Amino acid sequence: MLKALITDVDGTISGPDRELCLEAVQVIRSLVLSGVPVILASGNTACFMDALCKMIGSEGTFIGENGGIFRIGYKGEIFIRGDRSATKRCLSVITNVLKKEGLDLELFSHNYRFSDIAFARTVPIEHIKRLISDDSVAVVDTGYAIHIHSKGVSKGAAMVEIAKITGLAASDFLAIGDGINDIEMFRVAGKGAALKNAHKELKKVSDYVSQNMYGEGFIECVRLFLPHLLANDRSTTI
């Protein structure tokens, strides 16, 4: 029986405009109040995820930078899973070539990242991949940004580490997401539920695809797979 939840953020508990679905937040809060472990997993930075956890009202456990970092609880240290020196070298090569082509990268929170490099989707990912010769790194397009990180880094790998530390099994988790960067998370979780708006490759490895999109789809998935946990909180109105 599923005991916990791990969920993506952008496009899963938010709409395409990245505005949080308040009803989805209410569902997460209901689980937390019932004592259910909830992990927020995203490509965003540690400072962003810390603030998001506080505003939602979770216990503070998160995965950031697509698995490049994670933290357990608000008092936990940030674990770094990746070699940013390699990603920085790749960034230098890419930037130099693109400048010669009259192109530029819009970096996202560059000085706040510990593991990866993230930038706007203004340059085709295929072009970025052609410019990288370092076999130690991978490039992924999440639908919201392009990320360069060490190979082996993923939300799923970070999730397995968190589960071991906290005494859970990865199979205890329901994973909900919409992006191609959620695939490894689905593969190790007990169940994986993709939203209607999810990437087609994620849908292929999911146990369920919601009929609704974005936040409403998230709520649908939680109600389907975790009704026994939501019922523990008698004060919830969902």
Image (spheres, grey):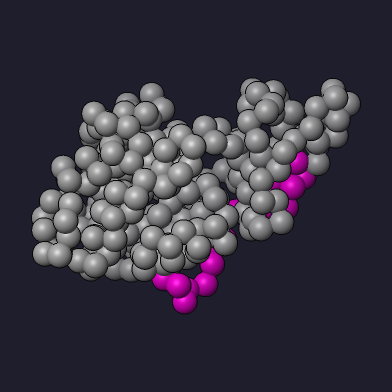
Pinpoint residue 130: horizontal percent, then vertical percent: 70, 24
| Quarter of the figure with residue 176 | top left
Comparing 215 with 184, the one in front is 215
What's the magenta region? 73-91
Q: Nearer the viewer, residue 216 or 128?
A: 216
Q: Is residue 224 left or right of residue 161?
A: left
| 196 up-or-down from 217: above or below | above
Residue drawn at x 24%, y 60% as measured from the top left: 31
* Number of numbered discs visible in the structure rendering: 0
Q: Residue at x 35, y 36 (%)?
A: 214
Does the stretch in magenta take in 32? no
**Residue 172 % position (x, y):** 23, 55
- Which residue lies most toward the bottom here? 75
**Residue occupying image coordinates x 26% and y 48%:** 174
With respect to residue 70, does 12 lie above or below?
above
Residue 206, can we see it?
no
Q: At which x and y percent is residue 20? A: 41, 47
Q: Quadrant of residue 5?
A: bottom left
Q: Is residue 223 visible?
A: yes
The location of residue 201, given as percent across then percent down, is 39, 26
